Amino acid sequence: MSDNSAIGETLRWKKFPVLNDGFVCLVDWMGSDDAVVQAARVSYGAGTKRVSDDRTLIRYLLRHHHTTPFEMAELKFYVRVPMDTWRQWVRHRTASINEYSTRYSHAIDSACETEPGAWRLQAKSNRQGSEGFLSAEEGEILSREEAAFHKSARDLYTRRIDMGIAREQARKDLPLATYTEAYWKIDLHNLLHFLALRMESNAQIEIRSYAAAIAEEIVRPLFPVTYEAFLDYRFGALTLTRLEQDVISRLAGARKIPAALDDFLAMQDEAWRPLERCRERDEALEKFRRLGLVRPE
Amino acid sequence: MSDNSAIGETLRWKKFPVLNDGFVCLVDWMGSDDAVVQAARVSYGAGTKRVSDDRTLIRYLLRHHHTTPFEMAELKFYVRVPMDTWRQWVRHRTASINEYSTRYSHAIDSACETEPGAWRLQAKSNRQGSEGFLSAEEGEILSREEAAFHKSARDLYTRRIDMGIAREQARKDLPLATYTEAYWKIDLHNLLHFLALRMESNAQIEIRSYAAAIAEEIVRPLFPVTYEAFLDYRFGALTLTRLEQDVISRLAGARKIPAALDDFLAMQDEAWRPLERCRERDEALEKFRRLGLVRPE
Amino acid sequence: MSDNSAIGETLRWKKFPVLNDGFVCLVDWMGSDDAVVQAARVSYGAGTKRVSDDRTLIRYLLRHHHTTPFEMAELKFYVRVPMDTWRQWVRHRTASINEYSTRYSHAIDSACETEPGAWRLQAKSNRQGSEGFLSAEEGEILSREEAAFHKSARDLYTRRIDMGIAREQARKDLPLATYTEAYWKIDLHNLLHFLALRMESNAQIEIRSYAAAIAEEIVRPLFPVTYEAFLDYRFGALTLTRLEQDVISRLAGARKIPAALDDFLAMQDEAWRPLERCRERDEALEKFRRLGLVRPE
Amino acid sequence: MSDNSAIGETLRWKKFPVLNDGFVCLVDWMGSDDAVVQAARVSYGAGTKRVSDDRTLIRYLLRHHHTTPFEMAELKFYVRVPMDTWRQWVRHRTASINEYSTRYSHAIDSACETEPGAWRLQAKSNRQGSEGFLSAEEGEILSREEAAFHKSARDLYTRRIDMGIAREQARKDLPLATYTEAYWKIDLHNLLHFLALRMESNAQIEIRSYAAAIAEEIVRPLFPVTYEAFLDYRFGALTLTRLEQDVISRLAGARKIPAALDDFLAMQDEAWRPLERCRERDEALEKFRRLGLVRPE
C-alpha cells in the first residue's frame, strides 16, 4: 500500500463543480489506507505473526464493521452548497464545521438555478421523492419565474443593506437556494457513513451530487483500498431480514429456486399473508428478484 | 429537594410564544434536580458521611465544572422556529432532532414577520451584531415589502406544487424566515451550554428569544436549584485572563483601587502598551469598571 | 400502543443479577414505543393521511435505518460490573456516565470470581475468542488460586489504606476483576447499537451477559414493538456483500439451488478462486448454508 | 505564522517518557495555527478588509470561546499508559481510540511501579486528592510489596495462559497498574479541553504527567500561538462568580482594597454570613488573595 501524499497534493484546492455554481474541494487530510492498517494492528502485539496482508485486513475490517480504525484518517473539505442542501448536510453531527457567516459578511450573491429540463415531478409511490421531469416547455416557464424571483430576493436584500439594516436581519428572506460556503472536517469512518446515506437512491439528487463528487473524485483516489471495500461490503450490500431469510430457506428447501411469484406467495411470511398491500413483502420480492431467487415478472 | 412531576405536568405541551408565530413547549423530561444529586453521590460509597446537603452539592458541582451529573437529566421540546434561526440552533451537535420534513409534507405556510419598529441597524463596533432601530416610518416600508415578498414566495411555491413539482424541489426558494417545527431532545448539561451561548448579549436576538423562553419558562421551574446555580456561577460569571489578573494585582499592590483611567493605563500589560487600539485592553477596562476596580468614565 | 409507565415502575431499581456479584437495573426512562412514533410523525404535516399504524411505522423505521426517532427515548441504568468488562463498555461514547469513584471512596470489596467449570480455553480459529472449557478438576485449581489472589490483592489495598496512602494511589493494583458501579444513560437508538454489538456471538461472554439482561429484562418489556423489530431486522439480519449476491445470482441462474459444495466452488467469486484459504469464501459458504442455498456438509 | 511541518517531522514517533515505563508520542497531525485562522476567516467574505493579524485573531477566538476553528486541526498520538490512568483518559468521549487488545495478544509485561519516596498520603481537606508523602523508609516496604505483587500477578497470568485459558479471561486479574497502549486521535479544541482538565492541580498526578508531556513537548511547539493563548486565557484564567463580583464591588466602593480579612467578612455575601464553614466563601477568599484584593494572612 502506498503513500497518498502525491495524489493528495494534486487534489488539494481543486474545485470539483457540483450543481450550477457549487463545488467541493479537498483542503487537507491526515492518513492514508495505511493509517487504518496501522491502527488495526495495534491489537497484534510484538511477536505476533502478521495474519494478513494490508488489503485483506482493510477488507476484513470493513466487512465486519470494525469501524474504529477508519476513524484514524481525517479529511477536510471546502464546499459551496445551496443552504437547502446544507440543511440536510449539517444533520451529520460527527463532523466539524466553519460556515461562511452572513452576520459578518454580505450573503453570497448566487443561488442554485434550475434548468428548464430539470424540474422534477413528485413521486407517486415514494412520498419523499421525485420521479420524472416536467416538460421542458413548462420547465422554461418555471425557470424564468425562478430567475425573476432570485433577482427580486437579491434586490430586497440589497435594499435592506443599503438602508443600514443589520446583515443578520437583512438575510432573513434569502431563498433556501442561496449558496453558502463552509469548511467541513470529518474522519474517514463518519465520511463513509455520510456517503452510504447520501449516495443512496432515495437521497435528494442535490446532496447525492455532492456525495458522488466527494466519493469518486476525492475518497477513491485518496483511500483506494478502503473505498473499494466500502463499495463491495457496505454500499453494495444487501441485507436480509430474519423473515426474508426464512422465506428463502423454505423456497430452497422446496427446491423452488428460481421461484415463480406464486411459489413466493405460497411461502411468504405468515404475517404478510392476510395483507392485501404489504410494503415489507414488496421489499422482499424486489430483493429476491435482484438476487435471481424469484423470476422476473 | 422535591419531585418536579407536578410542575412538569402543568408545563407539558404548553406553548410559550416566541417571535410572531413561533413557540417552544416541553414534551417530556427525565429527572429533576435530584437526578443530578443522585448521580453525583455515586462517588460517595456506602458508609461515607453525607458531605453536604443537596443544594450545596449542586452548586458545588456547577461551580467546579463537574458536568457529568447534569447529563443525567434530559428534556424534550417541541419548537416552531424560523429556518434562519434553526440554522444556528442545529449547530449544537449534542442533541437529538426530528424536524418537520418538507420532502414529505407541504412547507408550513408561515414566515417570521418584522414589525415596522423592529428593523435593526448594523452595529458599527461589532461586525456581527446590530444596534438601534430604523425609524418606524422607514420600517413601515420594509415591513410592507417583506409582506409582499413573503406572499410572492408562497405563490411561487404553491404554483410549483400545483404543477406537480416534487416538494423536495419546490421548496428550494422558500425564504429563510419560513417556520419549521421540530422535536429537540438534549440533556441538562448540554442545554445549559446552549443557554449560556444563546442567552449572551451577542447572540442574535431571535435565538436569544427562544433561549430565554426555554430558560425562564421551562428550565427554571423544572430544575430550580440547578438553574439558580447556573445563573450565579456560569451565566453571571466573569472570567479574568492571566494578564488581567496581573493588572489587578499591580493596582491592588499600589493601593490604587478604585483606579483612575490613568492608573489603569500606567499598570496595563506590557503587550498592550504600545498599541493605540487594543481590543483586549478595552475588554479589561470594561470588566474592571463592571467590578468597580476602575472608576466610571 | 400503550403507555409503559406501569411496567416501568415494576422494573425501577429491580436488580437483575449478572455474573457472580454484578447486576443491572433500570433507574429511570423517558418515552415508550409511542415516543418513536410521535417523533417520526412530525414529518407528516396536518391534513396528511395517516399512512400506517404505529407498529408498522416502527418496523418500517427500523428496517430502513431511520434512526433518529429512536433517539427520542432515553434509559438510565445503574450497573455493577467488573472493571474488565467496564473497559469494553465505556468504549460506547454516545452515553452519559457517572462512575463510583475510588478516589473518593474505598474500592468495592468484591471481584468477579470464576467457577471451576467456567475457565474457557483459547479459541483456535478466532484469535480473540474462547471455545470450550478447562476440565473442572483443573479449573478447581485455578479457582482456588484466583480466590487466594483476590484475597492478597485486597490485603495489599487495605494495608496501603491503613498506612494512610491516598485512595487514588492505593487502588493502582486492584485486579481488573474488581467490581465498579455506575449510572449509565443512553438513548434507545444508541442502546440498540450497543446491544447489537454486545449480544453478538463474538462479544466476550461477560459483557454479553450484561447486554442480554438489559435486552431481555428491560428493553423488551419497556419497548416491546421496537425490540421485536430490532430482533427481526437488525440483530437477526444477514448481510450479503456485493460479491455474495453475484454468486447467488449465478447459482440461481444455473438452477443449482440448493447447491452442492462443488457448484458453489465452481461459481465462486474470481478473486477467491486462486486462494487456498479464503476467509471471505468461508463466510459466504456459511451464510449460504444458513439460508439453505448450499447443502449442508 | 509559519508552517509546522518541519517541527512536526522532528517530533513524529519521538517517545517522551512518562512515569516509569510509559510514553506519549506524536504519530500524525493535520494543520497548524494557520488552520485555525483559515477556518475563522471563512466568516470574512471577499472584499472585507483584514480585521486583524493572525496572532491577534487566534487570541481573540480563544478568549471569546469561539471554539469551532480549533476543531479544524487534528492530532494523533501513540501512548503507553497504566490501565488505571487510561480509565480516566477514555472518559473524554470526543476522541478516536484504537487500544492494544489483550483478547488478541498477551498483556504487556509491565506495570507502573512506585518509587519508595513516591507513596502519597490521603489529603485531609480534599477527599479525592493526596498531599505529602510517606517516609521513604515506610515507602521502601510498600514498594517491595508492590514488586512482589506485580510478580505474583504476572505469574498467575502466565500460568493461566500456559494452561490454555483464553487470553480474554486470563487477563481478568491483571492489576490496574498494568500498561496498555493505544492510538489516540483528537482535534485541537477537544485536546485543549482535555489539557485544561488534566493539567489542573486536582487532577491525579499520573494523568497530569501525561497531560504535561503532551502540552509542553508536542502542542507547544506544534501550535505555539494557540498554546500561548490557551495558557493566557483559559488555563491561567480565573473565574469570578456573580456573588464574588458583588463582594469585590462592595469592597472597591468602600475603598477597602486591599482588604483586611475583617473587611472581607463584613462585606461577604449574605448567604455565606450565617455559615460557620462555607466552602464557597473559602474559595472566594483564596481567589481574592491571589489577586491581591485581600491581604495575605
Image (cartoon, coloured by chain):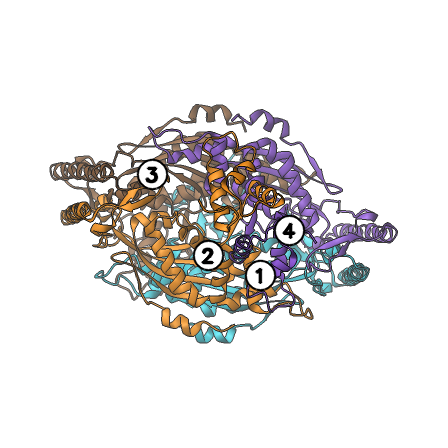
Chain colours: A purple, B cyan, C orange, D brown
Tell me which amino acid carries mark 4. Arg
Of pointers 4 and 1, the one earlier in the residue sequence: 1
Q: Nearer the viewer, mark 2 or mark 3?
A: 3
Q: Are marks 1 and 3 on the same chain?
A: no
Q: Are marks 2 and 3 on the same chain?
A: yes
Q: Label 1 belongs to which residue?
A: A268
Tell me which amino acid carries mark 1. Gln
Q: Are marks 1 and 2 on the same chain?
A: no
D256 versus B143 height, above or below: above
For mark 3, name the chain. Answer: C
Tell me which amino acid carries mark 2. Leu
Measuring from the top left, give residue A67's x and y in whole percent. Answer: 48, 42
Q: Label 2 belongs to which residue?
A: C192
For mark 1, name the chain. Answer: A
Q: Does the residue at mark 1 contact the one at mark 2 (Cβ under 8 Å)?
A: no
Which residue is found at the position 43% from the left and 73% from the top? C5
Measuring from the top left, give residue B235's x and y in whole percent. Answer: 47, 57
Measuring from the top left, give residue B239's x and y in whole percent. Answer: 45, 49
Residue C31 visible somewhere in the drawing: no
